[in-house]
Image (cartoon, rainbow, N blue to C red):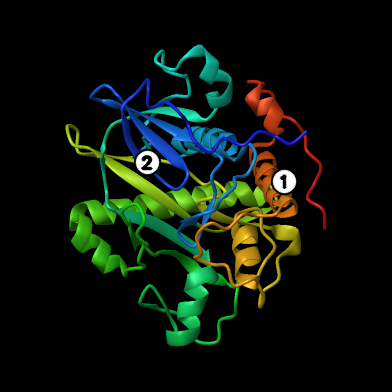
Amino acid sequence: MAERVLLHSELTDHLPLLGTGKVRDLYALGDDRLLFVATDRISAYDVVLKNGIPEKGRILTLLSQWWMSVLAEAIPEVETHLISLDLPTAVPEHLRPALQDRCMQVRRLQVFPIEAIVRGYLTGSAWKEYQAKGTVHGIPLPEGMRESQGLPEPLFTPSTKADAGGTDENIHPEEALRIVGEGYGKRIEALSLKLYKTARDHAAKRGIIIADTKFEFGLDSARDEILLIDEVLTPDSSRFWPASHYQVGRPQESFDKQYVRDYLTARGLQGKEGVELPADVVHETSRRYREAFERLVGKTFQQRRGGDESAAELPPLAS
């Protein structure tokens, strides 16, 4: 029997809907809190595809929660917007099974209008720009670098944060300072690099290379504190590569939605509306997301869902 896919959260009769993103639905919980609901929708090239990926929303939510805990423990100055994964009382009983482990109650903050991207490897749009100009987000790099090669040091390479239906635009770090202000911009850059390096080192012990990732931040204006928000180091917001298969000079196998991008690109479907993924692509994407989760967390997805906090030994990545 096919696994159920949740494409819509269906809470508009119970909570005020503030917005619908590519993956998440956003609801108000009073004046100071929000409810993020991660559906199973999947997007590529800024277009939401017609069908979703089973359990994807739960994987994103539980992995984000886990990373937030790990990073806050490793980096004392890290504070997140997460309050709880508990379902609010406004969610009716008949919707609770479908929404369990998909919802994050979070603090309501002023969101900085940039995507805080950190790149450790030369891939994706960064590789394309380097081939054309020898730069990444306008930052010069050494000559002679190859696809998927590690950068001399991780780079903070922000982008604009587009409104719904828009497209993010890669920008130079100096432009990010102009958008958010120099003081906030420098703090966001330093924190993003620290978060990436900490996560990179953890993932390396689990046989995964984090090639790049995207963070988002919000401002607690009452305390002038910058908080880590939204999803954190998931297969949607990051490129995860199996270290055992890594080879410079070519595209890499991945545990993220690059697999979907590659499928669309090979068929000339990138950026097209109404595309439905075939069953085998859906299954393989789901498998890759689960494997990323289990390698990083060190326990199976079902153990994590069941609240089992004991570590589970997983077999090493296949070579």
Q: Against 227, is 180 above or below? A: below
Q: Against 180, is 309 above or below? A: above
Q: Against 169, is 180 above or below? A: above
Instruction: Name the residue beneath numbered marker 1.
Output: 287
Instruction: Name the residue beneath numbered marker 2.
Output: 228
Q: Against 2, is 126 above or below? A: below
Q: Quadrant of the C terminus?
A: bottom right
The numbered mark, 1 or 2, whose residue comes first in the sequence reads 2
Q: Quadrant of the N terminus?
A: top right
Residue at the spot x=19%, y=63% of the render?
Answer: 178
Relative side of 85 to 19, left or right: right
Instruction: Count all numbered tags in the image, as a single digit.
Output: 2
- Along the line of sight, the residue nearer the viewer: 195 or 89: 89
- Rendering coords of residue 118 (x, y %): 44, 59
Q: How crowded is mark 1: few (under 14 residues within 10 Å), some or many (20 or more)?
A: some
- Rendering coords of residue 22 (x, y %): 45, 48
Res. 159 image quadrant = bottom left
Residue at the spot x=55%, y=39% of the render?
Answer: 60
User: In front: mark 1 or mark 2?
Assistant: 1
- Along the line of sight, the residue nearer the viewer: 130 or 36: 36
Res. 12 image quadrant = top left
Dot 2 lies on which element? strand
Give, as a three-letter code, the residue at label 2: Leu
Which residue is farthest front?
Answer: 274
Residue at the spot x=39%, y=15% of the render?
Answer: 90
Give, as a three-letter code, the residue at label 1: Arg
